[in-house]
Image: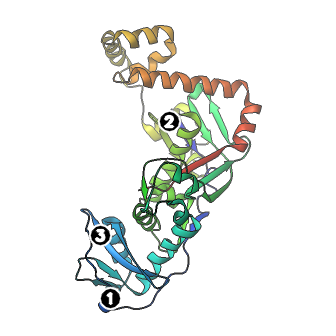
Amino acid sequence: MVIVATKGFYANSSDTVFKAQSGDNALRSNNNYSQSSTLLESGKVKVEFFSNNSEISLNLSSQAFDMLKSRFDKTDFLTLKNGAIGLSGNANAFVDGWYKDIMQNRNFANADANGDGIIRNEEFSQLKNGVKDEFAPHSFQYLNCADTIVLRDIKSTIGYQNSEIGNDLSLSDILSQTIQSDKNFDGNLTRLEIAANGQSDSIGYQNLATNTVKEIFSIDKGLKIIDDPTGKKMAAMDGKTVKEVNNFFFGSSDDDEDSKSKNKSVNLDKTDTEIQRLLNLYPELKSYYQANPNISKSELLAIKNTQEKLQNYKENQTDFNDIFTKFAFYTNLQA
């Protein structure tokens, strides 16, 4: 399925959803740290920093630590006798600012009911680490003849939303991921930076589209994304047919059709009984199987379920738009 994410869909990509507080930028020496014995985790870096005159010790991912070292002066990093790295000056201020945001604004301190530094199960209900997207009416368009979903307008994006229950999430994990995501070190995390997860803007744009389609239409496989945050890509396609657009972005799929048909017939003969029965009941699924002979029965059923949702959308577009006006898309910032 082709997903076209338009300029309107990315209108709020630069909106700030999390913001660091003011941090402690005092210059310190090795003598300022307790240097008590500490457990060093493989693949992580133990750092010690100060927040409101209290010494904090946490494990950062090696990627987050490397980003800190690439940004701040080497004098901001002190090698301590216990094997940890003491932060000073601007490096301390940056980490402390995000630490305060997580503990206070995202409510980690209260959510961590047992004080073990990890959010589990019902503790997620108190954590405000979510982001909510609200979509405008007519935000989504399904082009049945082209098997294409167009993502259009968005109303707003808001951070500090209640988190959904997920895998255990530690304070160190959230802080590491926050540092990695804030690539320009400006103390603001945008909708795009959250989606990029420390990677390129291009990946962030793709993730925004993929995550939205997954949440709304329950599709997360076989997606072909045309992300168009500037509007230039689709403007260049003006006057072209859907087939021409798909060929331009994804290449032609019409080569050697006779050979493909023969291979498809052979592959169908290899199908197990349950999938064959499913294909007999729903012949429209045969093209999906032919495109991917390794597809499972559960995946075919998921496609069938999605087709029914899309058909329902087509038949009840007014009601569907009302639903999406109220729809909230949540994502948690997790390592």
**Percent of width and height locating residue 153:** 68, 48
**Percent of width and height locating residue 236:** 57, 47
Above or below, comparing residue 226 to residue 73 in the picture: above
The figure's colour scheme reads rainbow
Query: Would you say 174 lies left or right of 9 here?
Result: left
Q: Are marks 3 and 1 in contact (CB under 8 Å)?
A: no
Above or below, comparing residue 217 to residue 98 in the picture: above
Q: Which residue is mark 2?
A: 246
Q: Secondary structure at mark 1?
A: helix
Q: Residue at x 53, y 21 (%)?
A: 304
Query: Would you say 106 lies left or right of 275 here?
Result: right
Q: Which mark is residue 155?
A: none
Per the model, the C-alpha gap separating discs 1 and 2 is 53 Å
Q: Type of residue at label 2?
A: Asn
Per the model, the C-alpha gap separating discs 3 and 2 is 46 Å
Q: Is residue 230 visible?
A: no
Q: Residue at x 47, y 36 (%)?
A: 220
Which residue is at the far front?
114
Q: Depth check: 333 or 285 in front? A: 333
Q: Are marks 3 and 2 in contact (CB under 8 Å)?
A: no
Q: Which residue is mark 3?
A: 45
Q: Which residue is mark 1?
A: 75
Q: Depth check: 183 or 224 in front? A: 183
Q: Type of residue at label 1?
A: Thr
Per the model, the C-alpha gap separating discs 3 and 1 is 17 Å
Mark before the other along the chain sequence, 3 or 1: 3
Q: Depth check: 101 or 331 in front? A: 101
Q: Residue at x 50, y 25 (%)?
A: 303
